[in-house]
Image (spheres, coloured by chain):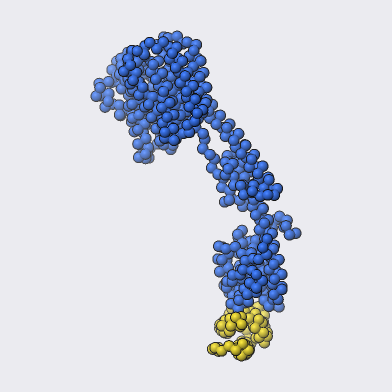
Chain colours: A blue, B yellow
Amino acid sequence: MSSQGKILIVDDSRTIRIKLKKSVEALGHQAEAVESGREALDRLAGESFDLILLDIIMPVMDGFEVLKSLKASSRTRDVPVIVISALDDEMSSVVKAIELGAEDFLPKNFELALLKARVATCIEKKRLRDVETEYLRQVAKLTKAAATLETGRFNPSKLGIRDVASRTDGLGKLATVFATMAQKVYERERKMRQNIRTFRGALLLLACGGLWGVVVPLSKMASLVEAHPVGLAILIDIIGAVFCIGISVKRKTMPSLKDLTRTDWKFILGFAFISSVINQVLVYWVASKLPAFIVSIVIVLEGFAVFLFAAMMRTEAPNLKRFLGLGLGLVGIFIILLYGEPGEMATSWLWLAVALVIPVTYATEDIYLSEFKPASIDNVALFGITLVVSVLMLIPLATFYQDFIPFDLLTGRLGIIVVLMAAAGNLAMLLFIVLITTTGAVFASQNAYAGTAAGIGWSMLLLGESIPALTWVSLALVVVGLLMVEPKQEAEEEPPLLDDSLEEFVPRLDLVPSATD
Amino acid sequence: MELVESFLEEGPSIMQDLQVSAGASDLAATRRAAHSLKSNARDMGANDLAEICARLERRCESGEPPDLLQIDNARNAFDVAITELREIFGLGGRRE
């Protein structure tokens, strides 16, 4: 440890400043001299010194005021101060200065040997105090890191104790052990949270798929009465809009329309177009032309399309495990397809080709929702507004194709089917918005498996077919597959703000035993 | 040598501060000037001047206004010190 220091001389007399500077430099130290207390404080605000030689009697700001300011600031309170005194008649001033925190005093007509001894002692003390302060600061960092750990939300690589762990003493060892334990706790908790998310996501997914699955056989039943795909979509959207907006108004979550930004409107228009004009009409239309279970099976390809889109857009991490999970779900569905005597598929290969567009447009909707949904608007309110926009988009289409459902048809069987479709379809879409927001597009796209499996089940039930035992095996495969895909990983914890708020963890140096005691 | 030169440059303005502040009965400023001149005079070996300044400083500290005779004495002792320093160190220049 070097015994040479950087010393600040504060004296209003130029002659005394020169004398002190030359003396200090002759002892091998580096010296800077200023002529006023104000100037000294300004210098100390931007520069570190090992010692201050301070005159007491100065104009404007005397040595006492300088001392008070120095001791009041955490940055300068540990810099030792030697007051320069004429000694003969200023003993009371020296006593006062020492009471204010000065380390020592030096007569103005000092001997060089005395200056050397006092300066050397002060600098050595300062160096020891610096080591002690650094040690306490690092203890404080470790304490703060421990407090952060206790809150349960932390990122082990950003605990800010790397420099503490690099120490070779006991504190360094403690920090290393602590960092390793923090890493283990973090990984365990992260895994646990991920498992909970997967479990919740799986439940939501099955509920969503089960509801969605009923839509295809119901639309088939509706088309058996009379096929009006656009008119059907309009009716279902109106019922959904009335419910969603009603609920939002009651919950006071309905945003004022003038508060919606340009981006919000762009999303709503896009979502309404993809979801209602394309997807809804396409499904109802295709369902009127193909057997319901075939439509359901085709929809299962949505999962692969989303996985492909998400990987291409790099919005989610593609890996072998997730790919195999999707594959397993697909195998489950094909088991049903093979077992379900696919002779009917020959009905219309052209319509089957049209049906193949559905998984692609569904996947587009999934990615669109996952990436662009405005977080500031309540999900139910957002969906309600979207449904109103959808109806406005569908009305010209229905007018053009003369596709409105005649009112007298609604009083019979078709009316009940429409209400059931509206309840199942809209609730499924709401659950899907929640699902996609919390788990990501790839995981949520597996609702296609659940929906397909449920759709086949529902069509067998509603259209009078028996449910083979193998359907349950394929359903089990779908569940295993979705557990393998897992929801997207949660984001890393934000680092705690360590250096800004260490103060409360740093014991005051004057309250702990000094190393020199 | 540099210290003497510094004193020859700085001293006259401190002496003037002393005279002006004493004339204005500004005790704090008079005390500061006397204190500064005293420390410098001691370093220069001007013991008479240092002694007069020390007395002036104590007087101001006790709240008594400076005696103008003391100020004159300080002025005289200062002039003597300056002259002697110039002679000893062979330095020319202006006199106050």
Q: Is residue A483 left or right of residue A314?
A: right
- Examine the rendered structure and indicate whether residue A492 appears above or below residue B53: above
Farthest residue in the front direction? Answer: A320
From the top left corner, tell me how far across and down residue A237 is, in percent: 35, 25
Between B31 and A78, the residue placed more toward the observer is: A78
Position of the N terminus of chain A, as image quadrant, is bottom right
Q: Position of residue B66 (x, y in %)?
A: 62, 84
* Front position in the image: A174 or A500: A174
Dividing the image into 4 quarters, which one contains the C terminus of chain A?
A: bottom right
Question: Which residue is painted at 60% across and 62% down in the image?
Answer: A48
Asked if residue A190 lies left or right of residue A360, the reply is right
Q: Is residue A112 visible?
A: yes
Left or right for A19, reference A265: right
Q: Residue sitting at 60 percent across and 80 percent down?
A: B2
Q: Residue at x 53, y 42 (%)?
A: A494
Residue at 57% across, 51% down:
A500
User: How many numbered dots are placed on residues in this image?
Assistant: 0
Snapshot quadrant of residue B24:
bottom right
Q: Quadrant of residue B30?
A: bottom right
Relative to A285, residue A268 above or below: below
**Which quadrant of the view contains residue B12?**
bottom right
In the picture provided, is A354 more to the left or to the right than A106? left
Q: Is residue A90 visible?
A: no
Q: In the picture shown, does residue A146 fall above or below A222? A: below
Residue A486 spot, x, y in % from top left: 51, 28
